[in-house]
Amino acid sequence: MYRLVTRLPFFYGWAILFAAGSSMVVRNSAASLTLAVFLYPMSEDLGWSRTLIAGAASLGGLLATVASPVVGWALDRYGARVILTGSVFVLGIATVSLAWATVPIAFYLAYGTARVIFSSPLNIGSSVLVSRWFVRKRGRATGILFSSHSIGMITFPLLAGLVVKYRGWEDAWIVLGVLVWVLALGPVSMLVRQTPESVGLLPDGDLPGETGSEADASAVPEEPSWTLREAMRTPTLWLLALATGSLFLLQSGTNIHQGAYFLDQGLGVGVSAATLSLNAVFTGVGSLFWGWLVDRVPVRYAYAGVALMMAVALALFPMADTTIEALVVASMFGAAVGGILVVPVVAYANYFGRRSLSAIRGVTEPFVSLGQAIGALFSGIIYDVTGSYKDAFIVLAILGFATIAMLLLTRAPTRVGVESMMKG
């Protein structure tokens, strides 16, 4: 492997990015936008409430809060290739089995498993892997990674919708599950390597002692190196974790119910589907934009900008009752979702370094999973109680504006004080 990667005409990190990106594409078999396609036909066919169906995503999120610390440890212990390969295989099984999940317990077991894979090993494993292979170009590489997620956000709900229309929702789950194996098993099992140093390379494709113009122009301070124990003693870690969990609560509380909301607004199936597609497209655009921006401005300002865009979009949702308004607000929200995918990943790596990044992400990712679990259930309950999602959007918008202040308080952590606490 060493001879191969050192003789390639390009940096092997781009092959790593491709493999990680394939896993990000297929995780969308359990994404909230994909579930949104199934929400209406399954509720009508099986007589289930929207809260019951959305509750499976909440269950998966809650289970992922327990799984994420273990996943972080396992990524360091067994390597990203083993974890990602096993995760893709299980995700395919869980997705296919949803075709026969016609009782709530079976649906919760299958979708909950898929959602754990979505939220924990595929999310943590792929993003940590890319953060280890790129330092100077971390923002843009992470942006490309999550634009791959956006490709899945576009294609998986679209494909599911077509199969549901012509073959039914049962066949749609089978098609998505098989697609998981076809697209990702090969790349993650054959291409993934843990770090550039493990194959004799340096991050970003730099050479020892390189003094090229790009390296000089893009030079960054010495990379930090925090252990999990040290990082857990900094307020920065918990501010980031809490703010990220809050923003993912907003994302889940909106994405799962977005399609049904615009149907309730009387805009029709075509407009509802178009808003889901634009949401996904602009998530990809937003991923690239925020990845570019976070390499150029302080992380906390970029992240606060993401929160502002998301809060404004949510404030506009209750007023979106025409086709144009629905498309605009869905696009704006999608661009903000791209930011919450990219910016926190870069923030954790930039603030705490690559040394214990898997373990650190494993400890903080439960905030994301918990936020997604609460958000999905919250909006469903508000709808079942009031008959409308508008009150849910208002509450979520207020939480988004509050999160901006939290993000502006984050600073790059310093060892002063942390060392004294550890000595004490």
Image: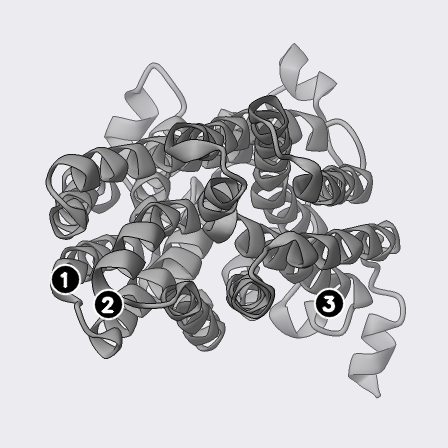
Residue 352 in picture, x, y percent from top left: 67, 55
The residue labelled by disc 1 is 97
Residue 296 in picture, x, y percent from top left: 75, 27
Secondary structure, mark 3, is helix
At label 1, the amino acid type is Ser
At label 3, the amino acid type is Trp
Name the image quarter holding residue 92. Answer: bottom left
- Tell which tag, 3 or 2, sits nearer the viewer: 2
Quote the CA–CA distance across marks 3 and 1: 37 Å
The residue labelled by disc 3 is 238
Tell me: residue 165, above or below residue 52: above
The residue labelled by disc 2 is 110
Label 2: how many Cα within 10 Å (few below 14, some 14–19, many 20+):
many
At label 2, the amino acid type is Ala
Label 3: how many Cα within 10 Å (few below 14, some 14–19, many 20+):
some
Residue 336 in picture, x, y percent from top left: 64, 37
Dot 2 or dot 1, earlier in sequence: 1
For the residues bearing labels 2 and 1, Cβ distance under 8 angstroms: yes
Tell me: residue 6, above or below residue 16: above
Residue 398 in the figure: left or right of residue 8? right
Residue 225 seen from this side: no
Secondary structure, mark 2, is helix
Q: Residue at x 63, y 27 (%)?
A: 325
Quote the CA–CA distance across marks 3 and 2: 32 Å
Tell me: residue 414, above or below residue 234: above
Quote the CA–CA distance across marks 2 and 1: 7 Å
Question: Of 25 and 371, which appears nearest the observer?
Answer: 371
Image quadrant containing the C terminus: bottom right
Secondary structure, mark 1, is helix
For the residues bearing labels 3 and 1, Cβ distance under 8 angstroms: no
